[in-house]
Amino acid sequence: MSVRVDPSFLEELRRFGAPDVTACFNCGNCTAVCPLAGEEGSFPRRLIRYAQLGLRQRLAASSELWLCYGCGDCSETCPRQADPTGFLASARRYFISAWDLTTIAPRLYTSPIFTACLIGVLTVVLTGMFLGSGGRLNREKLELFGFVDLEWIHYTGIAVLVLAGLAVVANIANLVRASLLAIRPGPQGPRPLLQAAWGAMGDTLKELALQRNFAKCESPIKSAQGRWYLNMRFLHLAIMWGFLGLWGATALDFLFKTPGSFVPLWYPARLLGSVSGLLVLYGTSVAILFRLTKKGGRLFASTLLSDWLLLSLLWIVTASGFAVEIAVYQAEGPAWGYVAFLVHVVVAMELLILMPFTKFAHAIYRPVGIWAFHLRARRQG
């Protein structure tokens, strides 16, 4: 793969929170302690070397970039305080931004003013649109879809998903193209390639479901003092599976339940949504607490705007969802239930709109990066 050396690359990475990796003299200590280094023994120091030399394309093609969960072992033992963990996180932020054709992502990652203005504009527009669709306040009983019209929510959601989906597909194409450039030829013919791609898909799903590589990292367990419910792997799994469960509950509601109709708490979709919501609320609350107190491991030692944006949106969506549920199950629906419902719908739409451009995008980039890594491994033996 032909590459071009770019001396300005390190300066660009610093805009996305990269530490001063010029301090790294490639001693290999980070590779020695990293549980994901593998037999070739070059991760993560090889990626740092790419950045030092300005080999932007080589770094973009390194699917290992998406394997790191940020346990911090490498940074804690680095004799030069080069902070490989922070470097890998900043590189992921950089490429999510660099592959975004709209240029929204780099602005969200680097400009608090732009972020505040965009969130403000989205909030005003969505609030005005939803209130204009209904706006009827029944004080005798809670009629949420008289306050915000169901069809407006439905079609706005479809429009948002389509636009976000198009942005994601365009951005992911850049990741796939960069990753495939690093795969050397394997067995010839379409069948071996398809077999390798299918096998890599299975490897990826296994990793995503249980995140077994996370278990190899000892720092999160040490930082939680042996309490499994506070280590990074459990928090990450709680947020991921909780969010997927909320999607599933929403789909079941849409398919099998009349909108606005009353169902008991043990109704399958409602029960799934409640359990999933608790997982997300717990995971995001502990993560926010760890970031505020700078406890819980290296990952929480420093927090950027992108971290706060994702955690805040997820927490508000989940907390407002529970507030709506509490209001619905009261004998006389309180007026604040309407406010909670409006907040829930507006922030949920904002979360989906911003998905391709914020840290939330790693939920798509990471699986693709893991798949490319396993595909390369299978093609190259």
Image (cartoon, grey):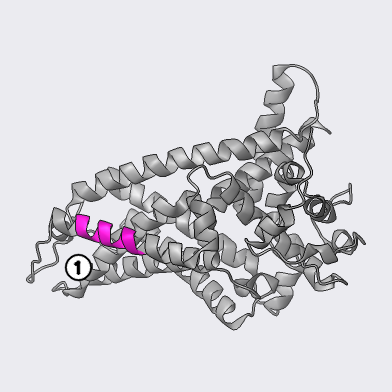
Say which of 12 and 182 sits in front.
12
Say which of 97 and 302 sits in front.
97
Quarter-of-image position of residue 323: bottom left
Per the image, the residue denoted by label 1 is 338
Residue at 80% of width from left, 67% of height from top? 82
In the drawing, does residue 232 fall left or right of residue 341? Answer: right
> Measured along the vertical axis of the image, is residue 19 above or below residue 289?
above
Residue 279 seen? no
In the drawing, does residue 52 fall left or right of residue 336? Answer: right
In the drawing, does residue 74 fall left or right of residue 18? Answer: right
Q: Main secondary structure of the magenta part?
A: helix
Residue 123, magenta (yes or no): yes
Q: SS of the residue at dot 1?
A: helix
Quadrant into which the N terminus falls: top right
Q: Which residues are magenta?
A: 120-129
Quarter-of-image position of residue 324: bottom left
Quadrant into which the C terminus falls: top right
Task: Give coordinates of residue 162: x percent, y percent.
Answer: 38, 39
- The residue sitting at the top extreme is 189
> Measured along the vertical axis of the image, is residue 312 above or below residue 290?
above
Count every numbered label the image shows and give the total. 1
Residue at 38% of width from left, 68% of height from top? 316
Residue 342 seen? yes
In the drawing, does residue 244 fall left or right of residue 20? Answer: left
Residue at 41% of width from left, 66% of height from top? 116
- The residue sitting at the right extreme is 27
Task: Give coordinates of residue 290: x percent, y percent.
Answer: 58, 77
Task: Give coordinates of residue 164: x percent, y percent.
Answer: 42, 44
Quarter-of-image position of residue 255: top left
Kindly identify the amino acid type of the residue bearing the numbered disc 1: Tyr
Residue 16, magenta (yes or no): no
> Measured along the vertical axis of the image, is residue 186 above or below residue 3?
above
